[in-house]
Image: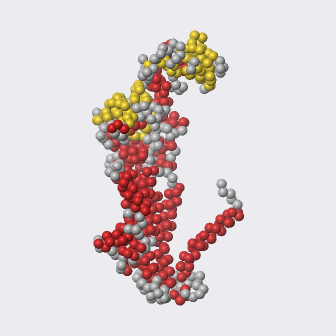
């Protein structure tokens, strides 16, 4: 097991003036054994970052170290990592056993050792009865477990997950998420997990890296990312519905942005005048969509509070200790 | 949906039967002719039921002991030459095309695009166009009347390279990356993953190229001058004596049937692979 450090990592495609830089200097220290989720919208560079750690993409500038070894010029196979891909990337012509054993065979691990390791992984992942089958005879979830098995048997120092749950249906996704958590508790291997799904990020991560357009906006625990978002991007990306970001509401000075989460709004005679546009019932609570002048605002209210009528006006107030202030120019928290 | 109506079924079966008749009748006639004596065949009308001379005719053809006006070369030997030629051409083509497609798809090297287009352009140059220079080279190298001379000029294949290239392009990148992480070097990846995945394409190509090699006529005609290096296709032609001499049609037909068997056998045996290739859409 090992720590991972990213030191001002830059990725650009092409050369010279035409170069297209997609990652603009990311620095992060992931301590040994931590489970870190890299989250961001598509095209933010999160997968590229992971693939640079894996060695599948060259590092244009900066350094990546696994343990105390800089791996910039080291082949993926020698980096002591294992990767789980979104589309499983299992070898279709091999049995599941061979799929898991292939890397070990290449490393010339003795046969009985391979057997032992694969059996152990199969037991952890409950794949024992499927080892002699081929990947195509398996369901999506089972295939993903084989792909994880292939990663486990290598006994790597770092696990890399590239959106491994995206191809699974919702129920299976939740289940596999729990399995990955369990796995990490048992193996304690440093893990990087890329996803665009904030729920996965919040539930799996010990710490989250939020990426936005090739820049790391925040690297913190899920609680902190939620409670103290570092930028307006993080504020709007994490949380559903997202944080309200108000520029022109009464009480907001020019050059500032006020952030307030929908659940931190109350219906109060003292607050802003809000025109109700739409009300959605989610069961235990309601989402109230409204407008303060030109700006949209969403409030999450308990079901028991009753629904305001669409078209009516209500007064909404923000809990004073739950306000987030951002700089309108940079989007950074102030 | 195609409706199931008895009349339509009957009609389509009739059409199919008719097609089979048209295709199969000449072959049937050839077979009938190969089981009669020479004199029986030339009668009018020609017999349409099997005769009694089958074993005699085929033995005569295979060993070259018939009393005939044309070439008396043993068909057995010619079949052997044809078989070796067709196998070498088919296997050689597949091996070379696999490797060149592998290089074109997975490696970066200077002038890669040009190389690819050069290979592609040769698609437009059939053997006949370059037959004279090829012949010159071969005779200078003393390769006439050798298996090498029969096969090597026919091995390079743009079609097969192109086919494998298309297939390799459809192999997901993640598979390549998974292999890299597993520590498989390029040749290891080629041997352990790419070739097994190409199995069905290889089988299909083998059938096509085997028949292509077996049916070669023009090139062996130039590249061989001695009877012991003639492939069977040429052998048939040489059995038919020119002029008004009476031909031993029974022996010739026996040879034709013999020449037809190996390609037919290859198709029948490999058919399972075709079907598998069609059913198995997974890559």
- The reply, left or right, for residue A79 in relation to residue A183 is left
The residue nearer to you, when weighing A163 against B86, is: B86
The residue nearer to you, when weighing B102 against A252, is: A252
The residue at 61%/18% (across/down) is A275
The residue nearer to you, when weighing B67 against B226, is: B226
- The reply, left or right, for residue A316 in relation to residue B110 is right
Q: Where residue A185 sits: x, y (%)?
A: 42, 32
The residue nearer to you, when weighing A19 against A127, is: A19
Q: Is residue B269 above or below residue B194?
A: below
Q: Where residue A230 sits: x, y (%)?
A: 43, 22
Q: Quadrant of residue A30?
A: top left
Q: Where residue A95 sits: x, y (%)?
A: 44, 50
Q: Quadrant of residue B81?
A: bottom left
Residue A50 seen:
no
- The reply, left or right, for residue A330 in relation to residue A302 is left
Q: Where residue A295 sits: x, y (%)?
A: 55, 21
The residue at 35%/52% (across/down) is B112
In which quadrant will I find the N terminus of chain A? top left
- The reply, left or right, for residue A304 in relation to residue B84 is right
Residue most extreme to the top: A270
Q: Is residue A83 above or below residue B7?
A: above
Q: Is residue A158 above or below residue B131?
A: above
In which quadrant will I find the C terminus of chain A? top left
Q: Quadrant of residue B73?
A: bottom left
The residue at 53%/13% (across/down) is A250
Q: Is residue A22 above or below residue B188?
A: above
Residue A237 seen:
yes
The residue at 41%/84% (across/down) is B72
């Amino acid at each position: 097991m090992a720590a991972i450090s990213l030191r001002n990592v830059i990725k650009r495609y092409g050369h010279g003036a035409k170069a297209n830089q997609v990652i603009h200097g990311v620095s992060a220290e992931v301590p040994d054994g931590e489970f870190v989720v890299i989250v961001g919208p598509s095209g933010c560079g999160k997968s590229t970052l992971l693939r640079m750690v894996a060695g599948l993409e060259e590092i244009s500038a900066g350094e990546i170290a696994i343990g105390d070894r800089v791996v910039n010029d080291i082949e993926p196979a020698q980096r002591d990592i294992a990767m789980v891909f979104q589309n499983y990337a299992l070898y279709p012509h091999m049995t599941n056993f061979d799929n898991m054993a292939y890397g070990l065979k290449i490393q010339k691990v003795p046969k009985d050792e391979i057997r032992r390791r694969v059996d152990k992984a199969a037991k952890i992942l409950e794949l024992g009865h499927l080892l002699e089958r081929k990947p195509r005879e398996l369901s999506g979830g089972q295939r993903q477990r084989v792909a994880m098995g292939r990663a486990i048997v290598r006994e790597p120092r770092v696990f890399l997950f590239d959106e491994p749950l995206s191809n699974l249906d919702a129920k299976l996704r939740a289940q596999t998420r729990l399995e990955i958590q369990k796995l990490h508790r048992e193996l304690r291997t440093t893990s990087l997990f890329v996803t665009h799904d904030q729920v996965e990020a919040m539930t799996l991560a010990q710490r989250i890296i939020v990426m936005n357009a090739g820049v790391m906006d925040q690297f913190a625990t899920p609680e902190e990312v939620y409670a103290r978002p570092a930028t307006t991007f993080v504020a709007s990306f994490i949380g559903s519905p997202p944080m309200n970001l108000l520029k022109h509401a009464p009480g907001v000075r020019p050059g500032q942005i006020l952030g307030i989460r929908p659940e931190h709004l109350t219906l109060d005679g003292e607050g802003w005048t809000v025109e109700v546009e739409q009300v959605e019932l989610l069961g235990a609570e309601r989402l109230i969509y409204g407008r303060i002048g030109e700006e949209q605002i969403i409030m999450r209210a308990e079901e028991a509070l009753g629904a305001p009528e669409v078209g009516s006006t209500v007064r909404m107030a923000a809990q004073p200790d739950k306000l987030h202030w951002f700089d309108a120019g940079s989007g950074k928290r102030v | 949906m195609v409706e199931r109506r008895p009349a339509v079924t009957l009609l389509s079966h009739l059409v199919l039967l008719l097609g089979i008749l048209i295709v199969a009748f000449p072959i049937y006639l050839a077979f009938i002719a190969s089981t009669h004596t020479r004199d029986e065949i030339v009668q009018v009308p020609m017999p349409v039921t099997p005769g009694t001379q089958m074993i005699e005719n085929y033995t005569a053809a295979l060993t070259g002991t018939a009393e005939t006006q044309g070439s008396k070369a043993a068909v057995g030997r010619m079949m052997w030459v044809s078989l070796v030629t067709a196998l070498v051409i088919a296997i050689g083509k597949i091996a070379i095309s696999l490797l060149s497609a592998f290089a074109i798809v997975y490696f970066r090297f200077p002038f890669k695009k040009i190389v690819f287009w050069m290979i592609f352009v040769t698609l437009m140059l059939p053997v006949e166009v370059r037959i004279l220079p090829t012949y010159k080279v071969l005779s200078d190298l003393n390769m006439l009347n050798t298996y090498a001379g029969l096969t090597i000029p026919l091995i390079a294949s743009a079609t097969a390279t192109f086919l494998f290239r298309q297939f390799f392009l459809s192999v997901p990148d993640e598979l390549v990356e998974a292999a890299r992480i597993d520590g498989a070097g390029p040749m290891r990846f080629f041997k352990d993953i790419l070739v097994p995945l190409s199995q069905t394409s290889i089988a299909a190509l083998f059938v096509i190229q085997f028949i292509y090699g077996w049916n070669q006529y023009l090139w062996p005609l130039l590249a061989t001058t001695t009877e012991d290096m003639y492939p069977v296709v040429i052998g048939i032609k040489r059995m038919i004596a020119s002029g008004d001499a009476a031909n031993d049609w029974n022996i010739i037909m026996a040879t034709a049937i013999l020449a037809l068997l190996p390609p037919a056998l290859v198709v029948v045996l490999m058919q399972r692979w075709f079907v598998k290739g069609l059913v198995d859409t997974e890559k």
